[in-house]
């Protein structure tokens, strides 16, 4: 629930896990793998092999480079996990994680200069977890004349 650090090509999974938990959800444009790992880990034990299994290559055309899109799908995956619930899902952690996804999405909108979308996402983050200082700092940034964040594109 904290983050998806699993590369799809590095996961080894039993066929019965997939039969039990379903296939990748094709309605998700991004983060289908994270949705799958949350569904599988809610029902099956998982283990980590502390060894590099794959190489990860970054390139400019990569879909995961679009931070706003990634954060929007990140929030959707956490929302779906919360809706599914289950005894293994710590609800407080999931709500805090959803808040963080909205905060990150708000900051991505802020970097793009879309203040309306940034404020909407940051307010949503506050309703879920009002104690994170980065949310408040980002909202305050929306009210300042120079609103740019580090890494923002020039106007």
Image (spheres, rainbow, N blue to C red):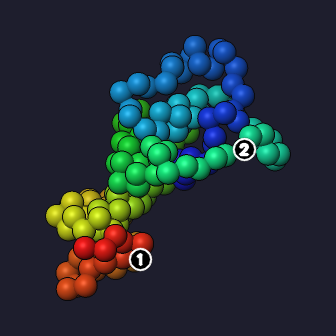
Provide residue 154's location: percent of width, then percent of height.
31, 74
In the picture of the structure, the residue carrying the numbered disc 2 is 55
Looking at the image, which residue is at 35% across and 54% down? 68
* Foreground residue among 65 and 59: 59
- Answer above or below: position of 143 versus 101: below
Q: How many marks?
A: 2
* Foreground residue among 58 and 12: 58
Residue at the farthest right position: 51
Residue 69: tell me if it is visible: yes
Looking at the image, which residue is at 43% across and 25% down? 25
Compared across the picture, whether 63 is left or right of 5 comes to left
Residue 91: tell me if it is visible: no
Kindly indicate the quadrant of the structure image that contains residue 120. Answer: bottom left
* Foreground residue among 104 and 18: 104
Looking at the image, which residue is at 51% across and 18% down? 22
Dot label at residue 34: none
Dot label at residue 150: 1
Kindly indicate the quadrant of the structure image that contains residue 128. Answer: bottom left
Badge 2 local density, few (<14 within 10 Å), some, or many (20+)? few
Q: Secondary structure at mark 1?
A: loop
Looking at the image, which residue is at 49% across and 24% down? 24
Q: Earlier in the sequence, mark 2 or mark 1?
A: 2
* Foreground residue among 15 and 117: 117
Q: Secondary structure at mark 2?
A: loop
In the rendered image, the quadrant that contains the C terminus is bottom left
Q: CA distance from mark 2 to mark 1?
A: 29 Å
């Amino acid at each position: 629930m904290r983050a998806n650090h699993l590369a799809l090509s590095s996961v080894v999974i039993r066929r019965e896990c997939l039969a039990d938990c379903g296939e990748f959800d094709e309605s998700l444009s991004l983060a289908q793998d994270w949705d799958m790992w949350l569904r599988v880990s809610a029902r099956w034990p998982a283990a980590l092999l502390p060894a590099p299994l794959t190489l990860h290559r970054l390139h400019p055309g990569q879909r995961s480079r679009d931070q706003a899109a990634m954060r929007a799908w990140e929030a959707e995956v956490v929302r779906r996990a919360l809706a599914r619930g289950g005894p293994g899902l710590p609800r407080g952690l999931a709500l805090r994680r959803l808040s963080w996804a909205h905060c990150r999405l708000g900051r991505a909108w802020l970097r793009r200069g879309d203040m309306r979308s940034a404020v909407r996402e940051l307010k949503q983050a506050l309703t879920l977890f009002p104690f994170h200082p980065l949310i408040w700092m980002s909202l305050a940034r929306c009210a300042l004349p120079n609103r740019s964040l580090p890494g923002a594109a020039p106007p």
